[in-house]
Image (cartoon, rainbow, N blue to C red):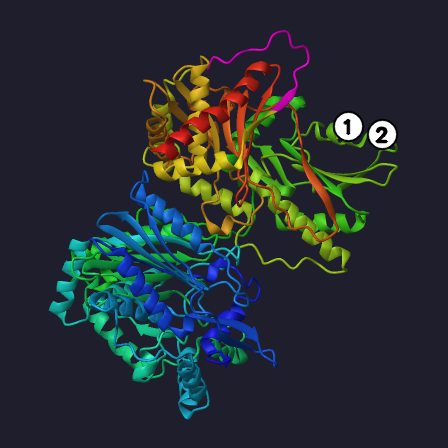
Amino acid sequence: MTGLSVTAAQSRILIAQQPDPQSPAHNLSLVVEVAGPIDLDRTAEAIRRTVSHAEALHVRFRAGEDGTPRQVPAPADTWPLDVVDLREAADPEAAAQAWMDRDARTRVDVTGSDALFAHALLRLADERTVWYQRYHPALVDGYGIALLVADTVARCDDPDLESNAGEWAVRDLVDADRDYRGSARFAADRDYWLAEVLGSPEPPQLCAGATDASASPESTTVHIDAGIADALSAFAADVGIRRSRLPMALLVAYLHRITGLRDLTVAVPIAARVGRGIRRTPGTVSTILPVTFHVDPDATVGELARAIDVRLVAALRHGRFPGGDLEREVHAIDPDRRVFGPGINSMMFEHPLALGGSPAGVRDLVTGPVRDLDFSILGGGDGEPVRIDLRVPAGRRADLLRHQDRLVHFLSQFFADPMATVGTLDPMTDDDRSPTLVPTDGSGPVPLAPSQRLHWLRHRAAGRSARADHALALHFAGSVDPEHLSRALDDVVDRHAPLRTLFATDGREVLASDGPRPRLEMIEIGDDDLQRRVHGLAQLRIDLTEEAPVRLHLVCDDAGRQVLLLTMHYLAVDDRSVGLLLADLLSAYAARSGGGRPQWAPLEVAYPDYALWQDRLLGDPADPDSRHARQLDYWRNRLSDMPARLHLPAPAGVREPRRETIRVEIGAALRDGIDRLADRTETSTFMVLQAAFATILTRHGAGNDIPIGSLVAGRTEDALTGLVGCFSNLVVLRTDTSGSPRFDELLSRIRASNLEALDHRDVGFAYVAAELGGRAGTRYPQVLLVHDEQLRVDAPDGVLDGLLPVPVGMPSAELTLGFREPAGAGPVHAYFEFSTGVLDRDTVERWAREMPVLLEVVSDAEARA
């Protein structure tokens, strides 16, 4: 093969990857599980022969003389086929998944020399093997992967590992694509799809775009077990439809019920292959097209499946047209029109799949980035379960889990009555009938959100000694223009209501309203100590009934150094909000410095909308059936008999208490061990550290009932992702170390109790503390475990020279174990924080030395297991 042009499908993929050409988010992968004995050597040789036969896999991409991409030959023997024996692993399934997850994150350069695909055979047991495949999408599409699987299966069945596949020439695909684009059929298909799109309602948008375009989609799975899947196959045969069409009809019916649309447009992958030779050649030529299905709510799902079949046959007659071309054509007519919405991809096999004589099934398929809610249907052979994979854009996990719950609820009704009409199948669960987070008109006072109430009561109880909760010092690399910074601050305050909120009481309920706006205050300190003055400014008292909950001081010394001090109260800015606040402030400053205004995407809701929604969600505390009453009842029962105080070692003769921080060393290797332990026990780094924390406290006389406070994120809706405000609530995780449990057993206890606690996290901790006898709801846990968010700020080049937290006052808890995990590999940044007026420093230092040793022991035991 000499250098060739690329197909339209390949071009679309390469263009889509231009912002981050090596992003693993575009990788395709397929997992085939074999349930029976196979000859690994023979299977590996069959895979090698299939792969060697596929020209499409052995190319690289280069820019041609005219700048357009071209594909050139690459060596056919430089690709990896790993054979990995995991039978001795403590948990072979978890080990296999971790192996595949790591490989799926592989970054590949389409212009380099590395292979753009990989295969592996992972042996989990004597009679259980996983065949894993990863491809760059410019090499082969989903239909082509199915051809590769079918050819490998055929070779395994042949004594000589041969197959009857003809020539798999890339040139045939390129020539067919070129001929089609120059044909009358191309023009006719264009006219057909333009009329379809412009003559149909816009597709629904069920999920907003990704919060991080370079990140992989969020995913989860709904399983239909083999018995129910076989019953569905029998039902499909009885009503005269293909069994592979029934799950698609169920998903179309679900989308209809969720959206209310009778004419529902769905993004459907189409093979786009015409002619026997092209249909049998792996490569990348498929397209995705918006197919509109008419849904009659009075029809059964079986009747809908037949209608879908008829509609797809009509669409397939025009199914070679490139979806990217269609979108450009539509936007040339109507720039704002949405062309693609939710997607449905079916990879069900009509006949059972076997590899080397043993039954096999597709258990996982990853198809690259998604724009909206996307379904992939897998499995469904005789005696095989059906798997429906749901994916949404990165950062939209709340939407994903909501649809998972609704789909399970919807399917259960169909299984109970397959002849029910579509309009009677209800996807809404009881939780869905709760109030919806929606924008309000913004008028009138707003009650405190449950997460704010504790901070408000503690602020009031502190009286004239009240201070802010946290502060951050931004060190600038060059000179800062105060005027531009002041305008940027105004922009941010306009965008985020909590920054201009005044708190007041009407004698019964605390109310929030617009109040004084924070202003930038210039502080010239001459030759005074810059760090000392910044620390002192952070300690100034604050009265939230009279002033804004955020202060900004620009501190300048005679040496020309400038530090911007942000002092913030949790009532307005929780830890997660700090990064959002800084990002908005710095982007606004860059815009103002350039003579413009910040160009932010509008927020879907404001913080007052969240507070009002929480008020409606929790309901009337006097109503025993309200969420507020039910959750408060749970906490009353859960915490009523917990110890009033833990015995912690007091300091001797400290005159001036100081806030102290002691580092806990958790290096990269130890972090890997913790990750393996968490994976095997289905826990998390947080739970492993909680178990170690509780173990150390128990060893040193604190007892075997260890209540540990923890801040839990309250951003349960994707619309809250970009808001600055107070969302984190405090929950108490009661940790039972009685009976000297093994570490695994302690983790099992923690997992069960934590998950139960998190199911009751909505009611504000102030109400819980008041119920348990804390004065005015201000009682704070003695010990805290805090998972710090890693602060990442996108600052314009050359603006920031660093940022550092500034301690404010004394710690809220007597002892805090905090930790922060870097995004990639590396150590965990962990520390103990305490006041020397409450705890003995030598003892805390000993705990900081003991914790890594304990974690090494339990992770070593995991490695030996």
Report the amino acid beneath label 1: Arg
Question: Which disc, if any, is residue 528?
Answer: 2
In magenta stretch: residue 151: no
Asked whether disc 1 touches disc 2, contact meaning CB atoms under 8 Å apart, the reply is: yes
Q: Is residue 741 above or below residue 115?
A: above
Question: Which disc, if any, is residue 726?
Answer: none
Q: Which residue is mark 1?
A: 532
Quarter occupied by the C terminus: top left
Q: Is 400 positioned to the left or the right of 811 in the image?
A: left
Say which residue appears at 49% left-offset and 73% top-offset.
Answer: 12
Q: Is 2 positioned to the left or the right of 427 in the image?
A: right
Say which residue appears at 38% left-offset and 27% top-offset.
Answer: 635
Front residue of 800/642: it is 800
Q: Is 159 positioned to the left or the right of 50 in the image?
A: left
Q: How many marks?
A: 2
Mark 2 Cα-neighbour bin, 10 Å: few <14, some 14–19, many ≥20: few
Chain part drawn in magenta: 645-661
Indicate the secondary structure of the residue bearing disc 2: loop
Position of residue 629 measured from the top left corner of the image (x, y, whole percent): 36, 32
Give the main secondary structure, helix, strand or loop, of the magenta stretch.
loop
Indicate the secondary structure of the residue bearing disc 1: helix
